[in-house]
Image (cartoon, rainbow, N blue to C red):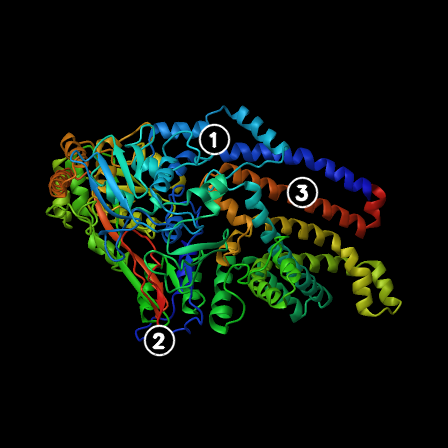
Amino acid sequence: MLLGLTLSACAARPPQTEPFGEPPPVPATDTLIVAKPDDAAGLDPALVSDSESSQVCRNLFDTLVRHKQDSMQLEPALAVSWDHSRDGRTWTFHLRKGVEFHDGTPFNAQAVVDNYSRQFVPNHPLRFPGSRFPYWSDIWGTSPSVITSIEAQDDSTVVFHLSQVVAPFVENLAMPFFGIASPKALQKYGRDSFKHPVGTGAYRFVEWIPRERIVLEANPDYWDGAPQMKRIEFRPIKDPTSRQLQLEAGKVHLITGVMVENIETLKLNRAVKVITQPGMNVGYLAMNNQKPPFDNPLVRQAICYAIERHEIAKALYHDLAIVAHSHLPPMIWGQARVTPYDYDPARARELLAQAGYPDGFKSELWYMSAARAYYPDPKLMAECLQAMLAEIGIEVDLKVVDWGSYLEQVGKGKHQMALGGWVGDTGDPDNYLYVMLDSNNVDPERGGSNLCLYKNPEVHERLLKAREIVDQEQRAKLYAEAQVLIHQDAPSLPLVHANQNGAHHPNLEGYMLHPTGAMILQYVHWKR
Amino acid sequence: MRRVLLRRVGEIVPVIFGIALLVFLMVRMIPGDPVKIMLGERASPAEVAALRAELGLDQPMPSQFVSYVGQLARGDLGRSIIRNTRVQEDLGRTFPATIELACAAMAIAVVVGIGLGSIAALRRNSWWDALCGSLSLLGVSIPIFWLGLVLLLIFPATLHWFAFSGRTEATFPTPTGFYLIDSLLSGDLSNFVDVLNHLVLPAFTLSTVPLAMIARMTRSALIDVLSQDYIRLARAKGLPPFHIWWKHAVPNAMIPVITVIGLQFGYLLGGAVLTESVFQWPGLGNLIVEAVRQRDYPVVQGGILLVATTFCLVNVVVDLMYAWLDPRVRSES
């Protein structure tokens, strides 16, 4: 608390209402210095699962398909076109010709086969001791993998065989974690290839001094045109105040993770351009549907009516968040029309009385020790909810749980109420609704991702069916139906979708925040 | 002297073994599962079990410990379970950074601390004494992260003096890992200046607490010594005050001060986390804290073991310095 107060006090300047400051000089060379909250964990896209690593990898490696810079739409990358068999279980990708990896190895169908096979074929020669492929097992599973085999039909055609229909198949392949590395380099560096990334991307690797800097240089032979920025340096700067000060002083040129309370003032500073955009995330209040009194839908609905979410978005997020009406962020397709649970304490008390708790009850609310993309300050959020629930007679004790064990404990359902949240990996509704609300993800033994331990067979049927068909219109209908059911059951209360924020030098052009959180630096350049 | 050295080094071995056992147990007792953290939020139970077996975490604790000690004996600290880097490599990079910062901070603390403490003792009850007293009170009570941020705001942000964060922006070969030395070896003075520019603020920030402790300890020890008969004799003989202070008072007052210096040095090794985060200093403190958060057992174990060993060695040096300063200690051994 004291730390937070002092940090924000240090960062906050006297309240400004007029623009101030001057833009720092534009760097003489085409160099961009990016300050991020943390260093990369590794630079082999297949091995990492954190955003700091994947943001760097996105610029070193290409995927078969990728998202456009400004939307969730897909565009060709290393594959120029793709099609699927009638049963949706065989996908054929036609590859771009004449592309080379940074080490001169030609990119071809065999490279794709090698890259992906190493992630699920046991004893594959490119699978090294200690290698784990978190996203592969997350998305496709291992033993058995949904992708059963991959074959190179000819030098520029690659075919994927699937054991079942996976509706978001192509969408999933656009994740930076499925970037393709030079098989020759993987062979050469073996277990240490995470330190020697060789891809086909817009930038080539120069050096990585762990915890100090990662340096990339433009790839002059990039198939999509050589980038204008000649050199990129990523620096980990943990402290948000220091990141901001260095940006204002022109020492760094692009930062991520700006403190929401500073954004208003920062916007007035001519030395900085602030960028903000709704994020693909959701923060929600997870009620344990298997523990009384939260096993009663009336109690859950009462809680939904008791929370004034607009006030939360305003006070805690400085309006840099939107009130969530579903677990599905608004930029994702498959939305349902439902009447939101607007703040109505009288109705909440009425529902509590109906449920047999006219005088309320005592309960516990857990929150995590570390800030998340959707909760800049989990403690403050928990205190707000505590105060609002007190209004309808629910006396809430707060309990902080270390982030390291939070998900496990909440996943096992040890909580009564807990703060939950999710940052999507893809733009597919399955990545949200199935993960957070399907009964397949209730696992009291080991801890599942359904943090409200919600089970509804009707919802389950729709979520499962929607996974197995390719037609988007039909799927959207199923997701909408599932959300109506979920909304009635109110297993948890979606609170907000928080914006993602960043800031950069005012003369930097060509940079946009991407809903997936990807950092695309291919188009950035200095306006001189 | 040699016997002091041998005896003290011999005592270290069981201490380090004890620490290895303690760390091993403590790390495994904190709630939270590294396998869960590594595999993410959606790992299937089968994968969790497979990885647990691969890492040997499904073995009973005693056999885990035996294989850990076996590894240690071979000089192998293992690989980070989160990053897959060799623990030796991680420590080899962060340890020199921490030592460099700690030494710089200690140099500031010793010079300024002994100076302030001496002035306070020699000018006892004057406004000098009051000033030194309040400065050292400020030193121990000022929160380090706050001081660090204020310094950032004043120097690099406003006056454009010194660097914001990191160890250097220059590129040069780093054979020793101590950038001050490496930059000198590179033969380019501008590299050295750049490294120094990065070192000043974190070193100063980190020095405040030990500086204050050293100043207070110097003051009280000197006051004690200055009231001794032999000092009175020296004064009566008409020796110049500086000579009395430097030749007769300081060496005798140094024993408790050196104890404090030794203890504070140990604190600088592991306790520099806040300074390291404010100035993004890639040191050992942050490495260990991060590893604890991620339940990266090999890194936590290796890091703490290294800090503990260094701390023990610092204590040996302190003992040797006692012997060097005080003939009585020498003759006892």
Residue at image mark 3: B312
Q: To which chain does the residue with label 1 belong?
A: B
Q: Amino acid at mark 1?
A: Leu
Badge number at residue A20? 2
Tell me the subunit letter for badge 2: A
Considering the numbered disc 1 on the image, is that residue within a helix, a strand or a loop? loop
Instruction: Locate residue B10 relative to residue B67 in the image: left or right.
Output: right
Q: Which residue is mark 1?
A: B55
Q: Are marks 3 and 1 in contact (CB under 8 Å)?
A: no
Answer yes or no: are tags 2 and 1 on the same subunit.
no
Secondary structure, mark 3, is helix
- Of callouts 3 and 1, which one flags the residue occurring earlier in the amino acid sequence? 1
Please tell me whether mark 3 or mark 2 is closer to you in this view: 2
Residue found at x 28% / y 55%: A514
Frontmost residue, A60 versus A152: A152
Work out which quarter of the rendered image holds the C terminus of chain A and state it.
bottom left
Front label number (2 vs 1): 1
Kind of residue sitting beneath label 2: Phe
The Cα–Cα distance between marks 2 and 1, rounded to whole angstroms, is 55 Å
- Report whether mark 3 lies on the same chain as mark 2: no
Tell me residue A290's x, y (percent). 23, 30
Query: From what the image shows, is residue A344 above or below residue B32?
Result: below
Say left or right for B273 vs A440: right
| Pointer 3 chain | B
Asked whether the viewer can see residue A388, the reply is: yes
